[in-house]
Image (cartoon, coloured by chain):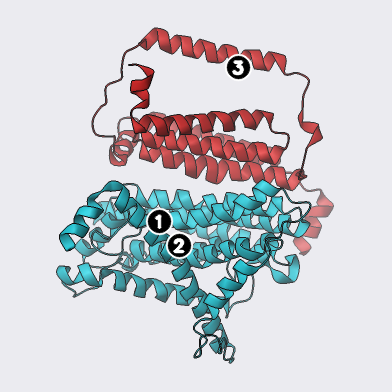
Chain colours: A cyan, B red
Amino acid sequence: MSAFLSDLFANFWVSLAGKLLLVALMIPLVGMVIGYAEMKLSAKMQARVGPYFAGGRWGWAQLIADGVKFFQKEDLIPEEADRPVFKIAPVLVLISTVALLVVIPFGPGIIFRDLSVGVFYALAISSLSTVGILMAGWSSGNKYSLMGGLRAAGQLIAYELPLVLAVIGSVMLAGTMSMSGIVEAQIEAGYPYLIIQFVGFGIFMVAALAELSRIPFDMPIAESELVMGYLTEYSGFRFLFFFLAEFANMFTLSAIAVTLFLGGYWLPGIPEDVLAYAGPVIVLAKTFLLVFAMIWFRWTFPRFREDQLQSLAWKWLIPLALANIIITGAFKVYL
Amino acid sequence: MSVSEWLGSPVNWVFLVVALATLFSSWRVVTAKNVVHAALYLVAALGGTAVLFLMLSAEFVAWVVVLVYIGAVLVLFLFGIMITRAPTGKDVGLDTPHKTWPALLSVATFVLLSWASIQAFGTTQVESVGEPTSTEVLGLALLGRFVIPFEVVSFVLLAALIGGVTIARRDLSPVEEEERRAV
């Protein structure tokens, strides 16, 4: 049986279809788990109960019910909208998230595709979502949407730089841009890069929060100012696409942070042969820890002002990231 | 190699589809009646270019095209267009009567370049160099043998950056200066 399976998956097309199916299943699943966690945790932090009835207990089926509800809704497109652009935008945003999963190592050899320029690929692909958000904001034919799209673009441009620069520290230490190569370098070094790259990790997480447009960086969809920003005119399954992309993106960006700074699928003291099986569990546990922190931030911090956001990126994070690169370089050469 | 032989290989099919899509998008960049559509077709054209680089195993260059051109340059294009003028629907101010000479010029450039490459290479097939150049080799070459041209280019870019800031910057009048300090 297993020989038959391995023969089957040796076929390029079968393995490609299998991987595609796995990714296509992972995104909604991860989105639902994080969405549910967000609902329950926010309820906890506000001394509420949260979803309770759906599914009979703990409201576990709330997100499934929500998903079904979104699919039943009418697919509304505003009269003034630019129809083709309006329709493509959510797909582009979701694709850029799905494509990120390709380079995340879930265990030794458990990776969809180990690109030699993995880190670079992740940064390039994630920048695609900016185009999708601008398209969504413009094509809605609504001033609030356009303002939201512009704010999002300004924010993503500003935080793209610290994100890229923060990653360079880990790449320099590992001497490779391959994601699994970076994890292996950390195993070989015997410590996660967090220990020397704590500045890089901090910058990465702040920039990731901004890239996700989550509180305290949620000016693009600030409800009290812009209705819902670039999401205003979206409804039904197109809204669901944005919604899924946001939650899945929390997962992928956290998983990238885990790979680059927290040792990926490695935990000290666990032998190599156990890692092969325990790897995915360890990655998921570390990733959900970071996702939890993101949710925690959302329900604890107020929103930044637009000018504070820009000066934080340009005056603090970018110089700090550059200094981090110089120090890491000196560390690498002299130690 | 005959046409049917050429079409026998699936790689060539992928190339054909991507190249035609890129050509079509580039054509639409010039002919689109809406300036945002033109910019979005440029995104598609550059995406096609990136895929062509990928097909040549130039992975690093392909993702540089995506990160720098789509992720930064075109996002700024779109940002600039949308913040100044961006009506949905047809944009009337886009057409120009001066089409003939630029069109002739581009056709002439195309003919010249094609003629030059056919003259230079004819039917010679480019031999595969084997292993694709790894990013590591590329980086070592840029910061080793080609470090001086690399630094010169970055210096020119820095000068352009400072120039851009100087042009865009508006000096405040003394009254405005005072107001700003008060805030």
Per the image, label 2 sits on a secondary structure element best described as helix
Read off the chain for label 1. A
Residue A153 locus on image (x, y percent): 62, 53
Can the viewer see residue A178? no
Could you tell which of marks 1 and 2 lies nearer the N-terminus? 1
Can you tell which mark lies on residue B107?
none
Circles 3 and 2: CB distance less than 8 Å?
no
Q: Residue at horizontal 78%, vertical 38%?
A: B90
Tell how many labels.
3
Q: Residue at horizontal 31%, vertical 60%?
A: A105
Q: Which residue is mark 3?
A: B106
- Foreground pick, A335 / A70: A70
Q: Which residue is mark 2?
A: A204
Q: Which residue is mark 1?
A: A167
Q: Amino acid at mark 2?
A: Phe
Give the class, few, some or many, for how many residues have Cα within 10 Å of label 1's Cα (few <14, many ≥20). Answer: many
Left of A168 or right of it: where is A137?
A: right
Q: Amino acid at mark 1?
A: Val
Residue A140 locus on image (x, y percent): 72, 54
